[in-house]
Image (tube, rainbow, N blue to C red):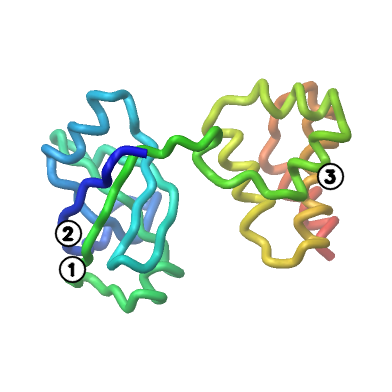
Amino acid sequence: MEEPLHFTSTLEISTNKLWGAHLPVPAPIAQVFLTEGAKRVVCKLNDTVEFQCALLPKGEGVYCIVVNKKIREQLGLREGSTARVSLHKDESEYGLPMPDELAEVLAQDEEGNRLFHALTPGKLRTLLYIVGHVKNTDARIARAFVIVEHLKKNAGKINYRQLNDELKGNDE
Protein backbone atom coordinates (compact mmCIF):
# COMPACT_ATOMS: atom_id res chain seq x y z
CA MET A 1 0.00 0.00 0.00
CA GLU A 2 1.26 3.43 -0.90
CA GLU A 3 1.56 6.15 1.71
CA PRO A 4 -1.77 7.87 2.34
CA LEU A 5 -2.31 11.48 1.34
CA HIS A 6 -3.48 13.79 4.14
CA PHE A 7 -5.51 16.99 4.16
CA THR A 8 -8.10 18.85 6.20
CA SER A 9 -11.57 19.47 4.80
CA THR A 10 -14.79 21.12 5.92
CA LEU A 11 -18.05 19.15 5.93
CA GLU A 12 -20.63 20.54 3.52
CA ILE A 13 -24.30 19.68 3.21
CA SER A 14 -24.99 18.44 -0.30
CA THR A 15 -27.36 20.23 -2.64
CA ASN A 16 -28.31 17.06 -4.52
CA LYS A 17 -30.72 14.26 -3.60
CA LEU A 18 -28.15 11.46 -3.76
CA TRP A 19 -26.26 12.06 -0.53
CA GLY A 20 -26.58 14.19 2.59
CA ALA A 21 -23.08 15.51 3.32
CA HIS A 22 -19.61 15.41 1.86
CA LEU A 23 -16.02 16.52 2.29
CA PRO A 24 -14.44 18.32 -0.67
CA VAL A 25 -11.11 16.84 -1.77
CA PRO A 26 -8.41 19.33 -2.82
CA ALA A 27 -7.90 19.17 -6.60
CA PRO A 28 -4.19 18.20 -6.44
CA ILE A 29 -5.00 15.25 -4.17
CA ALA A 30 -7.97 14.12 -6.26
CA GLN A 31 -5.79 14.30 -9.38
CA VAL A 32 -3.17 11.96 -7.87
CA PHE A 33 -5.80 9.23 -7.68
CA LEU A 34 -7.64 10.06 -10.88
CA THR A 35 -4.50 10.07 -13.02
CA GLU A 36 -3.87 6.52 -11.74
CA GLY A 37 -7.43 5.62 -12.77
CA ALA A 38 -8.39 5.13 -9.12
CA LYS A 39 -11.78 6.52 -8.15
CA ARG A 40 -12.17 4.06 -5.27
CA VAL A 41 -10.28 5.04 -2.12
CA VAL A 42 -10.02 4.13 1.54
CA CYS A 43 -10.75 7.15 3.71
CA LYS A 44 -9.79 7.62 7.35
CA LEU A 45 -11.34 10.53 9.23
CA ASN A 46 -9.81 12.11 12.33
CA ASP A 47 -7.46 9.12 12.69
CA THR A 48 -10.49 7.13 13.87
CA VAL A 49 -13.03 5.87 11.34
CA GLU A 50 -11.92 4.14 8.14
CA PHE A 51 -14.24 3.31 5.25
CA GLN A 52 -14.15 2.53 1.54
CA CYS A 53 -15.66 5.12 -0.78
CA ALA A 54 -15.42 6.84 -4.14
CA LEU A 55 -14.08 10.18 -5.28
CA LEU A 56 -17.29 11.64 -6.66
CA PRO A 57 -17.39 14.52 -9.13
CA LYS A 58 -19.17 17.50 -7.62
CA GLY A 59 -18.89 19.56 -10.81
CA GLU A 60 -16.41 22.04 -12.27
CA GLY A 61 -13.51 19.65 -11.66
CA VAL A 62 -14.19 19.41 -7.93
CA TYR A 63 -14.35 16.01 -6.23
CA CYS A 64 -15.73 15.00 -2.87
CA ILE A 65 -16.18 12.08 -0.49
CA VAL A 66 -19.63 11.28 0.89
CA VAL A 67 -19.79 10.96 4.68
CA ASN A 68 -22.86 9.05 5.82
CA LYS A 69 -24.97 9.96 8.84
CA LYS A 70 -23.64 7.12 10.98
CA ILE A 71 -20.02 8.27 10.53
CA ARG A 72 -20.94 11.93 11.01
CA GLU A 73 -22.69 11.11 14.29
CA GLN A 74 -19.85 8.84 15.42
CA LEU A 75 -17.35 11.67 14.92
CA GLY A 76 -19.67 14.52 15.95
CA LEU A 77 -19.38 16.17 12.52
CA ARG A 78 -21.87 18.82 11.50
CA GLU A 79 -22.03 21.28 8.61
CA GLY A 80 -18.91 23.44 8.84
CA SER A 81 -16.97 20.95 10.99
CA THR A 82 -13.41 20.29 9.88
CA ALA A 83 -12.02 16.79 9.64
CA ARG A 84 -8.53 15.38 9.17
CA VAL A 85 -8.69 13.18 6.10
CA SER A 86 -6.30 10.44 5.04
CA LEU A 87 -6.79 8.75 1.64
CA HIS A 88 -5.13 5.86 -0.08
CA LYS A 89 -6.04 3.84 -3.16
CA ASP A 90 -8.53 1.06 -2.53
CA GLU A 91 -6.74 -2.10 -3.61
CA SER A 92 -9.57 -4.44 -2.58
CA GLU A 93 -11.21 -6.68 -5.14
CA TYR A 94 -14.70 -5.21 -4.86
CA GLY A 95 -14.41 -1.78 -3.25
CA LEU A 96 -16.37 -3.01 -0.22
CA PRO A 97 -15.72 -5.93 2.12
CA MET A 98 -17.02 -9.33 0.99
CA PRO A 99 -19.26 -10.59 3.83
CA ASP A 100 -18.19 -14.08 4.93
CA GLU A 101 -21.78 -15.27 4.61
CA LEU A 102 -22.04 -14.24 0.96
CA ALA A 103 -18.61 -15.69 0.18
CA GLU A 104 -19.75 -19.03 1.60
CA VAL A 105 -23.02 -19.05 -0.36
CA LEU A 106 -21.13 -18.21 -3.56
CA ALA A 107 -18.55 -20.95 -2.85
CA GLN A 108 -21.37 -23.49 -2.64
CA ASP A 109 -23.29 -22.32 -5.73
CA GLU A 110 -21.32 -22.40 -8.97
CA GLU A 111 -24.04 -20.81 -11.11
CA GLY A 112 -24.76 -18.11 -8.52
CA ASN A 113 -21.03 -17.37 -8.26
CA ARG A 114 -20.70 -17.06 -12.04
CA LEU A 115 -23.72 -14.73 -12.30
CA PHE A 116 -22.58 -12.63 -9.33
CA HIS A 117 -19.09 -12.11 -10.74
CA ALA A 118 -20.49 -11.20 -14.19
CA LEU A 119 -22.11 -8.07 -12.69
CA THR A 120 -20.62 -4.59 -13.04
CA PRO A 121 -18.44 -3.37 -10.15
CA GLY A 122 -21.15 -0.94 -9.03
CA LYS A 123 -23.81 -3.65 -8.91
CA LEU A 124 -21.42 -5.93 -7.02
CA ARG A 125 -20.88 -3.21 -4.41
CA THR A 126 -24.63 -2.67 -4.09
CA LEU A 127 -25.18 -6.37 -3.36
CA LEU A 128 -22.22 -6.47 -0.97
CA TYR A 129 -23.72 -3.52 0.88
CA ILE A 130 -27.17 -5.15 1.03
CA VAL A 131 -25.70 -8.23 2.70
CA GLY A 132 -22.97 -6.60 4.76
CA HIS A 133 -24.76 -3.69 6.39
CA VAL A 134 -27.01 -5.82 8.61
CA LYS A 135 -25.52 -6.79 11.97
CA ASN A 136 -27.23 -10.15 12.48
CA THR A 137 -25.34 -13.14 11.05
CA ASP A 138 -28.53 -15.09 10.31
CA ALA A 139 -29.94 -12.10 8.42
CA ARG A 140 -26.72 -11.82 6.35
CA ILE A 141 -26.94 -15.52 5.47
CA ALA A 142 -30.60 -15.18 4.49
CA ARG A 143 -29.88 -12.09 2.38
CA ALA A 144 -27.01 -13.87 0.63
CA PHE A 145 -29.31 -16.75 -0.32
CA VAL A 146 -32.06 -14.39 -1.51
CA ILE A 147 -29.60 -12.45 -3.70
CA VAL A 148 -28.08 -15.55 -5.30
CA GLU A 149 -31.51 -17.04 -5.98
CA HIS A 150 -32.65 -13.71 -7.44
CA LEU A 151 -29.71 -13.67 -9.85
CA LYS A 152 -30.41 -17.24 -10.94
CA LYS A 153 -34.14 -16.61 -11.36
CA ASN A 154 -33.46 -13.47 -13.45
CA ALA A 155 -30.62 -14.81 -15.62
CA GLY A 156 -28.01 -12.64 -13.88
CA LYS A 157 -30.03 -9.42 -14.02
CA ILE A 158 -31.10 -7.44 -10.98
CA ASN A 159 -34.64 -6.15 -10.67
CA TYR A 160 -34.16 -3.94 -7.61
CA ARG A 161 -37.87 -3.55 -6.84
CA GLN A 162 -38.37 -7.31 -7.00
CA LEU A 163 -35.18 -7.96 -5.00
CA ASN A 164 -36.30 -5.48 -2.35
CA ASP A 165 -39.67 -7.28 -2.08
CA GLU A 166 -37.89 -10.65 -1.81
CA LEU A 167 -35.59 -9.31 0.89
CA LYS A 168 -38.51 -7.80 2.84
CA GLY A 169 -40.41 -11.07 2.63
CA ASN A 170 -37.34 -12.84 3.98
CA ASP A 171 -36.60 -10.32 6.76
CA GLU A 172 -40.05 -10.67 8.31
Q: Is residue 152 left or right of residue 55?
A: right
145, 90: nearer the viewer? 90
Q: Amino acid at mark 2?
A: Ser
Residue type, mark 1 in image:
Thr
Number of other residues with Cα within 10 Å of mark 2, as a class: few under 14, some 14 to 19, many 20 or more: some
Residue 16 point in image, percent of width and height = 31, 51
Q: Quadrant of residue 63?
A: top left
* Amino acid beneath label 3: Phe
SS label for mark 3: helix
Q: Secondary structure at mark 1?
A: strand
Residue 145: which numbered mark, if any? Answer: 3
Residue at the image point whose x is 58% and y is 47% from the top: 97
Mark toward the start of the polypeptide (1 vs 3): 1
Looking at the image, is 116 positioned above or below residue 12?
A: above
User: Residue 34, image x and y in percent?
Assistant: 25, 29
- The residue that disc 2 covers is 9
Q: Label 1, label 2: how many angstroms apart (C-alpha)?
A: 5 Å
Which residue is labeled 1 in the image? 82
Q: Quadrant of residue 89?
A: top left
Crowding near the residue tagged with mark 1, few <14, some 14–19, many ≥20 C-alpha atoms within 10 Å? some
First of labels 2, 3 by sequence position? 2
Which quadrant of the view contains residue 139? Answer: bottom right
Image location (x, y in percent) of residue 103: 74, 41
Which image quarter holds the N terminus? top left
Quick one: quadrant of the C terminus?
A: bottom right
Instruction: Relative to 102, say whether 13 is above or below.
Output: below
Q: Which mark is residue 119?
A: none
- Viewer-proximal residue among 5 and 139: 5
Determine contact: label 1, label 2, CB under 8 Å. Answer: yes
Residue 58 placement (x, y as % from top left): 23, 42
